[in-house]
Image (tube, grey):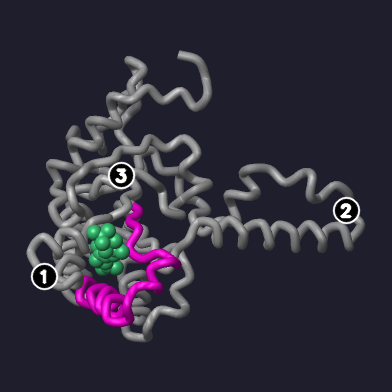
Amino acid sequence: MTDLKCASGGADGAPSDPRHVAIVMDGNGRWAARRSAPRLYGHNAGMNAMTEIVRHASDSGVGYLTVYAFSTENWKRGSDEVSGIFGLLVKFVELKLRELVENNVVVSVIGDYEPIPGEAKAALERTIEDTSRNTGMKFIIALNYGSRADILNAAKTLAREAAEAAGEGANAAASEITEADFAAKLSTAGVPDPDLIIRTSGEKRLSNFLLWEAAYSELVFTDVLWPDFTPAEFDRCVEEYRSRDRRYGGRT
Ligand code: FPP
């Protein structure tokens, strides 16, 4: 991939390199099944793939990388698998925090991480704190995240504020709400919309991920299972993105 720090792009109508890449990391279970191994073995390999991609995206000059690590629906999985995934999160922080700090990566979380087991929550809070003074790529972990819940929460906040404003005699508060006002209430406030969303493992859906933010994202689907997703495959997805014609509803 071109060094995105130097990216200009767009002069020939092709999009410039993506500032924000979001990834649905899918296929850990199937990767493990093909090896007759437990699902957690696949998640562990997925964690290693994630580490490689964070490093590569940061080195390539990507501004924002968001990964879907655990959805609000993933609690339906067996308790062993759920606690195993959170155990991996702790392991990830223990093994990789120093590298993230040294690589100037800023870690944040979207989603409600309140119900997450104590040790994993503490590990996350330590990561957020220890990387908060960095200035490089923003690595956003979607954890216990669901886009509909996020949108609903934004709607409730705006409705409450509009009702309060009406109580204070302000007219037309609700009808004056703009898209920017709405976006400012989402957990992704301040983050540019993803230019590129990648989903691995051949599934072709968004699964409640960044539904508002994906309005004009380019979607790239690859058959590669997440644990096999390499920096070279990331670059191939970016190349596919670069071949797209982004019109945002306009004409060619
Ligand atoms: C989807 O594969 C993957 C997940 C639900 C979990 C993602 C977790 C990791 C990549 C491990 C690292 C995470 C953290 C938070 C450090 P799947 O299990 O749905 O695979 P399948 O569709 O083949 O069954």
Q: Is residue 44 above or below residue 219?
A: below
Who is closer to the viewer here, 197 or 129? Answer: 197
Give coordinates of residue 216: x percent, y percent.
Answer: 47, 35
Residue 168's image quarter? bottom right
In which quadrant is the C terminus drawn? top left
Mark identifier at residue 37? 1
State how far apart marks 3 and 2 are (Cα). 44 Å
Query: Amino acid type of disc 2?
Result: Ala
Q: Residues within 10 Å of mark 3 (few under 14, many from 20)?
A: many
Residues at circles 1 and 2 in contact by the CB criterion of under 8 Å:
no
Query: Amino acid type of disc 3?
Result: Ile
Residue shown at 31%/72% (left/top)?
127
Give coordinates of residue 87: x percent, y percent.
Answer: 25, 79
Residue at mark 2: C-beta within 8 A of ligand 1: no
Disc 1 element: loop
Which residue in the protein does label 3 denote? 198
State how far apart marks 1 and 2 are (Cα). 62 Å
Give coordinates of residue 123: x percent, y percent.
Answer: 31, 78
Residue shown at 32%/81% (left/top)?
79
Q: Relative to residue 202, is residue 172 drawn left or right?
A: right
Task: Name the N-terminal-most of marks 1 and 3.
Answer: 1
In which quadrant is the N terminus drawn? top left
